[in-house]
Image: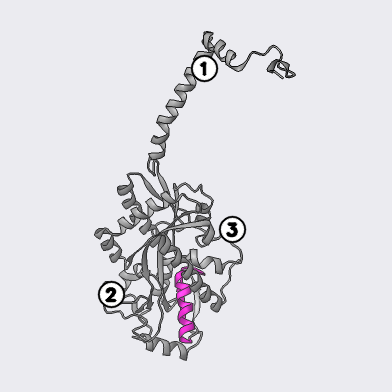
């Protein structure tokens, strides 16, 4: 059977003759214009694509959420970090304070942000404590945030009102044991680092001391100076001036080694209590932030932390540089969350 006998093909010229006919026929002006336009668009796309792909992050300002009020340790460190990132990544990094709900409001804002590297979070101890403190959280730090870098640590320091007739940790423990429930300790609020440090101290020493929560570090310190409470476990920076001035007495510090800032204050371990406690500060991004963005931010943050000027500024606050990258910070968070969960459970602390 030849092609002309196939049903539906009668009168249709062979393919080769059709091509020859089109080749010999001049194109219409619209057809030629469309073809030229298509070729031009394709060429422009090929030229532009590599340029877009190679454009480095960041290309616009970056917001770093600080879930605390301005003026605190986390806020100070966030601004120091932002200054360093500005210089290294040639873009504006801006610390934005979003306090509330024991850091949960600011954290939730970061979790809900677009995971593109333009909204970051400067977190602290609450990120590891809150999953155990609260019956329900609207986010899961382990899955909803991506660790970038652990920036610094500040050890807790046990300070007392000087009218308390003790000079050492051993004397304080004996005094508290002889008066169960009579001494009070201040904190920045339920679940804050000073609260958890005090609860850990009581569990390790068998003492019973009454918790008096304040609305922040400054009012808590003033309450201690005024003898409304007798002791507190704040970060060093909060009370350093008061210790130097003699309005508070430092008893022990929750670091592995003595601080150069306070060389005469022994560690808890030196004084017979195996307690390490403090506040840490870390940079995170929303989950699913692209790995190249996280890597670029981590490299820049670690470079900032190698700056001797930053070391000096942190040393003035009783803090030390941590310098952990994404994977190490993730492991630290996992261990810290488990550690604080035990402290919180043993102290029977629960928030709605």
Lower sequence index among marks 2 and 1: 1
Residue 345: image x %, image y %? 56, 76
* Separation (CA) of disc 2 from disc 1: 78 Å
Count of marks, rendered view: 3
Give the mark nearest the N terminus, 2 or 3.
3
Residue at (41, 64) in percent of width and height: 328
Q: What residue is rendered at 50% in x and 87% in y? A: 180
**Colour mode of the rendering:** one colour
Q: Position of residue 292 (x, y in %)?
A: 41, 49
- Give percent across and percent down for residue 99: 48, 57
Residue 235 in the image: above or below residue 172: above
Query: Of the residues under marks 1 and 3, which one precedes in the sequence?
Result: 1
The answer to whether residue 109 is seen in the rendering is yes
Residue at numbered disc 1: 34
Mark 2 = which residue?
Answer: 262
Q: Is residue 187 left or right of residue 303?
A: right
Is 220 covered by the magenta stretch?
no
- Inspect this view and state whether residue 72 appears: no
At mark 3, the secondary structure is: loop
Disc 2/disc 3 C-alpha distance (Å): 41 Å
Q: Residues within 10 Å of mark 3 (few under 14, many from 20)?
A: few
2 or 3: mark nearer the eye: 3
Q: Quadrant of the N terminus?
A: top right
User: Mark 2, mark 1: which one is toward the viewer?
Assistant: 1
Residue under label 3: 138
Residue 71 position (above or below residue 9):
below
Query: Does dot 1 land on a helix, a strand or a loop?
Result: helix
Check disc 2: other Cα within 10 Å, few if <14, some if 14-19, many if 20+.
Answer: some
Q: Nearer the viewer, residue 8 or 222?
A: 8
Percent coordinates x, y for residue 294 in the rendering: 42, 52
Q: Which residues are magenta?
A: 183-206
């Amino acid at each position: 059977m030849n092609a002309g006998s196939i049903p539906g093909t009668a009168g249709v010229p062979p393919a080769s003759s059709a091509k020859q006919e089109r080749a010999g026929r001049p194109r219409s002006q619209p057809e030629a214009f469309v073809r030229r336009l298509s070729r031009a668009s394709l060429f422009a796309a090929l030229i532009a694509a590599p340029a877009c792909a190679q454009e480095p992050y960041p290309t616009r300002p970056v917001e770093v959420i600080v879930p605390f009020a301005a003026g605190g340790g986390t806020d100070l460190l966030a601004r120091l970090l932002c200054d360093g990132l500005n210089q290294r990544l040639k873009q504006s990094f801006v610390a934005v304070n979003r306090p509330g709900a024991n850091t949960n409001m600011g954290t939730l804002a970061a979790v809900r942000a677009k995971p593109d590297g333009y909204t970051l979070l400067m977190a602290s101890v609450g990120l590891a404590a809150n999953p155990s403190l609260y019956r329900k959280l609207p986010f899961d730090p382990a899955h909803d945030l991506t660790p970038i870098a652990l920036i610094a640590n500040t050890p807790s320091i046990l300070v007392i009102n000087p009218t308390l007739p003790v000079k050492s940790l051993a004397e304080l423990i004996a005094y508290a044991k002889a008066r169960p429930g009579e001494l009070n300790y201040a904190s920045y609020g339920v679940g804050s680092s000073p609260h958890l440090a005090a609860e850990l101290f009581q569990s390790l020493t068998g003492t019973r001391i009454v918790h008096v929560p304040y609305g922040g570090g400054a009012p808590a310190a003033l309450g201690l100076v005024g003898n409304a409470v007798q002791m507190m476990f704040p970060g060093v920076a909060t009370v350093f001036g008061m210790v130097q001035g003699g309005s508070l007495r430092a008893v022990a510090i929750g670091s592995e080694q003595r601080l150069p800032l306070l060389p005469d204050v022994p560690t808890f371990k030196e004084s017979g209590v195996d307690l390490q406690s403090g506040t840490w500060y870390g940079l995170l991004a929303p989950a699913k932030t692209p790995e190249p963005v996280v890597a670029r931010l981590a490299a820049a943050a670690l470079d900032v932390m190698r700056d001797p000027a930053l070391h000096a500024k942190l040393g003035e606050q009783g803090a030390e540089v941590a310098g952990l990258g994404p994977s190490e910070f993730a492991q630290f968070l996992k261990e810290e969350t488990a550690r604080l969960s035990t402290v919180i459970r043993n102290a029977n602390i629960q928030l709605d």
